[in-house]
Amino acid sequence: MWSTARSDAALEARFPVPIDVRPMRSARRFRLRFDAAAGVLKLTCPQRTSRTAALAWALDQRDWIDRQVAQALPGEPFVPGATIPIEGIDTLLLWDADLPRTPALADGVLSCGGPGAGFAARIDRFLKARALDRMRADVADYCAKAGIDAATVSVGDAGSRWGSCSSERRIRLSWRLILAPPHVRRFVAAHEVAHLVHLNHGPDFKALEARLFGPGLAEAKADLRKLGPRIRRIGRRL
């Protein structure tokens, strides 16, 4: 029997695009695909599966969904005149050949000079350096609360996750988190620091993550899910 329309609608609202759930008599397992042309997720499932259970399963595939949506939609390259979020604040990208080559951020404008052909690369380097600076501070803050140290903190651009923590205590975070509001970025930092103590997602890990981050954990997670598809596109070519 299908669940109530209200609870299903609440689950559906958590997806970045519409989802079409199709129970099928011949289906033996869940199968999810993204129809880029229609902009719709299509999920087939065994006939006796409740709609609520099907939607819950699909939500567990959110990282995969975000990647598919980001790849299907056009990129937002770093070009003069574009507006991108930096730490959650809409920021205009400005190029003027007479300005210094080193980008400068002030009053909602990120500006730089030098040859126009190198504009995107200079913006990219600026954002990655800012990301590393902020995230090292975030990790240090949470490590102090957890009573543990990270061996290294670095930034990258892994397509499948926002952060990782190895058994050698090496934390790696997506530089793209510098585009998100600080509470979203700091949530990922807290999450990875908690992994320095617990390399799993069990109850002890979740308790430590909640203690480190403090109030607003659920909201930060929800905001990351909401913002993820767009910030994965920023800086990519059309």
Image: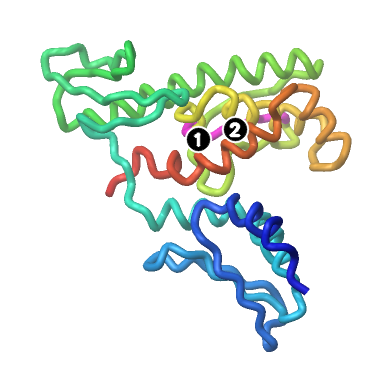
Q: Earlier in the sequence, mark 2 or mark 1?
A: 1
Question: What is the quadrant of residue 122 in the picture?
Answer: top left
Residue 144 in percent (x, y) is at: 75, 13
**Mark 1: secondary structure:** strand
Residue position for label 1: 156
Residue 63 in percent (x, y) is at: 58, 51
Residues shaded magenta: 169-176
Residue position for label 2: 172
Would residue 28 be found to the left or right of residue 226 on screen?
A: right
Q: Residues within 10 Å of mark 2 (few under 14, many from 20)?
A: many
The residue under the point 34% across, 38% down is 235
Residue furthest to the bottom: 26
Question: What is the quadrant of residue 117 in the picture?
Answer: top left
Pick the front one: 134 or 76:
76
How far, Cα to Cα, is label 2 from label 1?
Answer: 7 Å
Quadrant where the N terminus lies? bottom right
Residue furthest to the right: 204
Q: Residues within 10 Å of mark 1 (few under 14, many from 20)?
A: some
Circle 2: residue type:
Arg
Q: Is 238 placed above or below 174 here?
A: below
Residue 132 in percent (x, y) is at: 51, 22
The residue under the point 32% across, 12% down is 107
